[in-house]
Image (cartoon, helix red, strand yellow):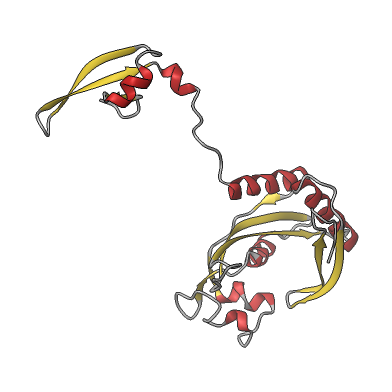
């Protein structure tokens, strides 16, 4: 008896619902371990072809949607390492040892130097060391880990990060790409607000706010 086939053991429940609608074939299956015969019914496979076997997880759907948009723009996809060194995760991103993010209160350490990455930014450093010819651009989507756990945070979450290295790249191009992406991802023409911010590994830096889909407010 092969479990890959749609074989149902005869019980009154299936008999009541299925026997009148679907053709069946009765046969016996002998169990060597228990020395008994089981009675099975094999139902028309066409019945099972009409059943729904579920869909992709919402996170997986979101990742596929993000990749689809950026790959249309010519971005490659790089996964990167989830187990990272302190050098690539912090030091080469201008995050010092006295920064709160690098402490063991916020980061999962295996050893003093090996850790679970806290962001996908470490992928940028590794890719820039590999790619010596300009221009190049990629997007990285993957799991990141931080010691946060409350109603709005989980120890593991997904992060998306992109990098463009080119002599002709401008901030206006970055804002334009983000605006088009947000409108595509949410399937709605969004309003955005660009505001300056500080990050130790990028200069200049800014963040983007999008409008509420219910009241259209940016506040």
Residue 74 visible at all: no
Quadrant assignment, res 15: top left
Residue 39: where, in percent of width, then height?
A: 21, 21
User: How many numbered discs sit on the rendered protein?
Assistant: 0
Residue 195 sits above or below residue 26 on the image: below
- Decide which of 176, 42 is in the foreground and name it: 42
- Which residue is at the front of the view, 149 or 33? 149
Q: Position of residue 199 (x, y in %)?
A: 75, 75
State left or right for residue 103 relative to residue 215: left
Decide if residue 125 is on the left or right side of residue 214.
left
Quadrant housing the C terminus: bottom right
Left or right: residue 196 versus residue 66 is: right
Q: Nearer the viewer, residue 59 or 51?
A: 51
Q: Residue 61 at what x, y percent from top left?
A: 62, 45
In the image, is residue 171 above or below residue 203? Answer: above
Q: Going by the picture, which residue comes out furthest to the left?
A: 35
Q: Could you tell whether 81 is left or right of 6 in the image?
A: right
Report which quarter residue 152 is drawn in. bottom right
**Residue found at x 85% / y 70%:** 195
**Residue 21 screen position, x and y as percent:** 40, 13
State the quadrant of the N terminus. Answer: top left
In this view, 12 is above or below 205 = above
Residue 182 in sight in this render: yes
């Amino acid at each position: 008896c092969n479990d890959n086939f749609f074989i149902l053991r005869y019980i009154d429940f299936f008999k009541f619902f299925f026997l009148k609608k679907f053709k069946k074939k009765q046969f016996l299956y002998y169990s060597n371990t228990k020395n008994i015969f089981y009675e099975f019914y094999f139902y028309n496979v066409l019945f099972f072809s009409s059943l729904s076997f579920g869909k992709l997880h919402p996170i997986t759907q979101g990742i596929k949607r993000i990749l689809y948009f950026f790959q249309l723009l010519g971005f490659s996809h790089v996964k990167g390492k989830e187990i990272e060194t302190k050098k690539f995760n912090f030091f080469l991103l201008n995050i010092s040892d006295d920064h709160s993010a690098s402490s063991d209160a916020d980061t999962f350490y295996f050893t003093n130097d090996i850790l679970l990455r806290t962001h996908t930014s470490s992928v940028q450093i590794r890719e820039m060391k590999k790619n010596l010819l300009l221009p190049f651009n990629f997007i990285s989507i993957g799991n990141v880990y931080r010691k946060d756990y409350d109603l709005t945070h989980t120890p593991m979450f997904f992060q998306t990060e992109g990098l463009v290295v080119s002599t002709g790249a401008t901030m206006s191009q970055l804002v334009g790409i983000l605006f088009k992406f947000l409108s595509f991802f949410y399937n709605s023409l969004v309003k955005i607000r660009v505001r300056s911010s500080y990050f130790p590994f990028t200069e200049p830096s800014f963040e983007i706010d999008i409008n509420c889909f219910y009241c259209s407010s940016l506040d």
